[in-house]
Every structure is written in structure tokens, then in C-alpha cells.
Amino acid sequence: MSEQTIRGVLLDEAALTLDELARACAVDTGWVVQRVQTGILLGGTDAAPEAWRFTSVDLVRARSLLRIERDFEANDEVAALVVDLTEEVRRLKARLRAVGM
């Protein structure tokens, strides 16, 4: 089976499986499993990996995590912190714009 990267836009009601998310990020499924088990993706879950479904938000987060890990040689926990802080700054800026600041 050839490795292929999936590109496209997910709708909110659409979901990716573990294999599809791994392909969309061009990573091994083990990379995704590790981040789900540590709560970095999907908020952690007790469900079996075959039952996991990832949204477009999860895809964007996974790609951001991967980029931080690769570009800065960061471990998964540091990458998660950077992504969390980036998302929070984005939310705060949106709130400021909403109130006219």
C-alpha cells in the first residue's frame, strides 16, 4: 500500500478514522495513538482505537502539533503546550475584536 497524504476540507459532521487521520498528517498511526492516550488529542479516551473518530478541529490540532514537534524538535508535551497557548491567544484576540478593541 502506498503512502498518500489526504488533503481536503472536513465538514463539522464528517469524521476521520485513526488511519485516515494518520494519513492526513503523513504520520504513523502510533504517533496518533500516543497523543490520544496522553490526552493531547481527543482529550484522551477509553474507547478502542477502531472506534476513534476525529473532527476537522482534531486534524488542525494534530497538524499543528506535528509542525511544532518537527520544526522545533519539541517533545509531544511541549508541542501541546505551544498549541494550547496559540489557540488561547487566537480566542482572546477574537473576543477583543468582538468587543471593538
Image (cartoon, rainbow, N blue to C red):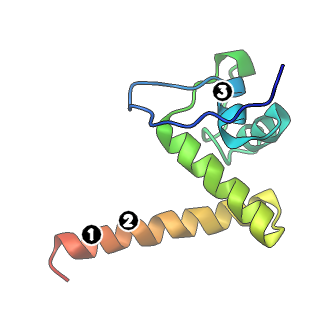
The residue that mark 1 highlights is: 95
Residue 35 appears in the picture as rendered: yes
Report if the CB atoms under discs 1 and 2 are less than 8 Å apart: yes
Query: Which residue appears at 61% of the width and 41% of the height?
Result: 43
Please provide percent x and percent y for residue 3: 79, 30
Eyeballing the image, is 8 above or below 80? above
Ranked by sequence position, the earlier of labels 3 and 2 is: 3
- Against 3, residue 63 (above or below) is below
Question: Looking at numbered disc 2 in the image, what kind of residue is underneath it?
Answer: Arg
Q: Quadrant of residue 17?
A: top right
Q: Name the residue under label 3.
A: 20
Q: Mark 2 points at which residue?
A: 91
Tag 3: residue type?
A: Glu
Q: Is 1 placed above or below 44 here?
A: above
The disc label shown at residue 49, or none = none
Please state if 2 lies on the left or on the right of 65 as rendered.
right
Q: How far apart are marks 3 and 2 (CA)?
A: 28 Å
**Residue plotted at (79% across, 62% down):** 70
